[in-house]
Image (tube, helix red, strand yellow):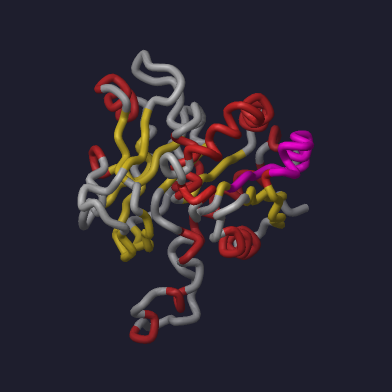
Amino acid sequence: MKPKTLILRTAGTNCDAETQHAFELAGASADKLHLNRVLSDPSLLEDYQLLALPGGFSYGDDIAAGKILANQIVHHLKEPLRRFIDAGKLIIGICNGFQVLVKTDLLPGALGGATGQTATLTHNDNGRFICEWVRVKPIGNKCIWTQNIPELELPIAHGEGKFIPATPGVRQALKDNGQIALVYTNQNPNGSTDDIAGVCDASGRVFGLMPHPERFVSAQQHPAWSSRKSPDAQGAGLAIFKNAVRYASQAVGAGV
């Protein structure tokens, strides 16, 4: 039986189809559901083992990137999502989804004596939207999504991707707990503290990142694909989804 993925979309989401495709290539089934359906019936979450908050510009990123969707989650879905996580299930937030998760208390979680929102993603240091390819490297093996993946190249596309911990204590706790899951290696495109490109929660099952792994699941999605030896090979980003699907397939508490 394939693990089931819920891809949560709302006004302004624009990467839901790519994310669905990535999970299906990785061996899961995937459904795109509008936020309003889940708000009206949070029990829908119980049918799924994986949850994805895809990229885009939810609600036009009014106020701040991801802030309105984060508020909806905090006020209406906080407890259902907490139960989802406590059941051993997995969540990923990509780009705008990452922005949403850090503007709730789901990522990186209560750290360094701080509670509530303990980090943010704010405007890039250069003050403009960035769309390019970067090299990133997983750190450690706490994060289920990035375990045993070597350095890889992924595209980014964001204007508010600078990760900043709320306090020095949160910054140190991220390092001490192994919750820095992904770092930029060849450049820091947005000024993120400690070159952070992605973090996970204390369980390693909730993961957020600014790069877009769903946009590199086929070798042909890379701009230099025609000069590579194996243009029919998978893209490096697919490994992130395969890790999650493999874990969900094997996890006793994930309800597969």
Residue 72's quadrant in the figure?
top right
| Residue reaching furthest to the front | 62
Q: Position of residue 167 (x, y in %)?
A: 28, 22
Left or right: 107 as drawn, with respect to 69: left
User: Where 32 sits versus 207, above or below?
Assistant: below
Left or right, residue 194 beside residue 11 = left
Give the image location of residue 254, x and y in percent: 69, 37
| Foreground pick, 49 / 61 | 61
Residue extending farthest to the top is: 113
Task: Give the tally of numbered discs.
Answer: 0
Which quadrant would the C terminus be assigned to in this image?
Answer: top right
Residue at the outermost bottom position = 226
Task: Tell which of 201 and 2 is nearer to you.
Answer: 201
Asked if 177 appears above or below 16 in the picture, the reply is: above
- Magenta stretch, main secondary structure, is helix
Q: Is residue 228 above or below residue 55?
A: below
The residue under the point 53% across, 45% down is 92
Seen at 30% across and 45% down, the residue is 123
Q: Residue at x 25, y 22 (%)?
A: 168
Residue 84 occupies which quadrant of the picture? top right
Q: Nearer the viewer, residue 108 or 120?
A: 120
- Horizontally, residue 160 falls left or right of residue 95, namely left
Where residue 7 sits in the image (x, y, percent)? 64, 51
Magenta stretch contains residue 16? no
Q: Position of residue 2 (x, y in %)?
A: 73, 54
Up the image or down, 216 lies above or below 87; here it is: below
Which portion, as a residue range, is magenta? 36-52
- Residue 47 falls within the magenta-colored stretch: yes
